[in-house]
Amino acid sequence: MSRCAYNFITTWKIRASLPHVWKLIHDNEDWPNWWKGVLKSDTIEEGDENEFGKIVDFCWKSVLPYKVNFCIISRFVEPPFILEGIAHGDAIGTGKWWLEEQEGITTVQCIWSVNMNKSWMNKLSFILKPLFLWNHRVIMSWGAKGLATQLNCELKSEVTQFYRRK
C-alpha cells in the first residue's frame, strides 16, 4: 500500500523576542499546557550534549475523531534558531523548526514533510485528504494562538501551506 505524503510549511509571525519564543518551542514538555491539540509531549531520551538523539513521544488530537502518535528523534539543534528531527510512528518523515527575529517580530517556520503510517488514512486519502489538510491547519493555528497567549503578545500572522514534493 502506498503512503500518502503530506508536506507543510507553517509560518507564524509574533511580536515577541526570539529568546522567549525559542524557550517555548524548545521546551516540548510544556506544549500541552499552551498548545490545544497536543495531548502528550514527553521526552523519553535526552540525547547527547547537543541534543542529538533526543527522543520525544507525541500524541496529537484535533477536530477530527482520531489521534496521531509519533516520536521525534532530534538530529540537529542550533539554539535559538533551528530544531530538526525525524518522525517515526503514525507519521514518518522529517520536521524542522526555524526561527528568526527582525525588529521585534519573531518569525517561526515549521516545515513538516511526512507520510502517514495509518492504513485507513492511506486507503481513504483519495477522498479525505482535504479534511486531513484542514485538520493540520487547525492544529497549527491553535499552536500560534496558544504561543501568543502564553507570551501575552500579539500574533501578527499565521499561515499553513501545503506543497508537493518534486
Image: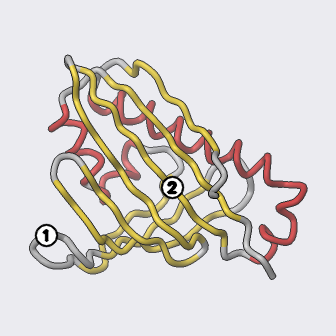
Residue 156 badge: none
Direction front: furthest residue: 166
Which quadrant is home to the N terminus?
bottom right
Is label 2 in contact with label 1 (beta carbons under 8 Å)?
A: no
Q: Give me the residue at 35% from left, 69% from top.
A: 42
- The answer for how far apart the CA atoms under marks 2 and 1 are is 22 Å
| Residue situated in front as seen by the camera: 152 or 107 | 107
Q: Which residue is mark 1?
A: 50
Q: Give me the residue at 64% from left, 58% from top.
A: 166
Q: In the displayed structure, would residue 32 be above or below residue 156?
A: below
Q: Give me the residue at 21% from left, 76% from top.
A: 46
Query: Where is residue 16, by image quadrant?
Result: top left
Tell me where residue 48 appears, x and y as whole percent: 14, 78
Q: Which residue is mark 2?
A: 112
Q: In the displayed structure, would residue 91 be above or below residue 152?
A: below
Direction right: furthest residue: 127
Tell whether 96 sits left or right of 63: left
Name the element at disc 2. strand
Q: In the displayed structure, would residue 109 be above or below residue 87?
A: above
Direction left: furthest residue: 49
Q: In the displayed structure, would residue 128 be above or below residue 100?
A: below
Tell whether 89 sits left or right of 147: right
Name the element at disc 1. loop
Kind of residue at disc 2: Trp
Mark count: 2
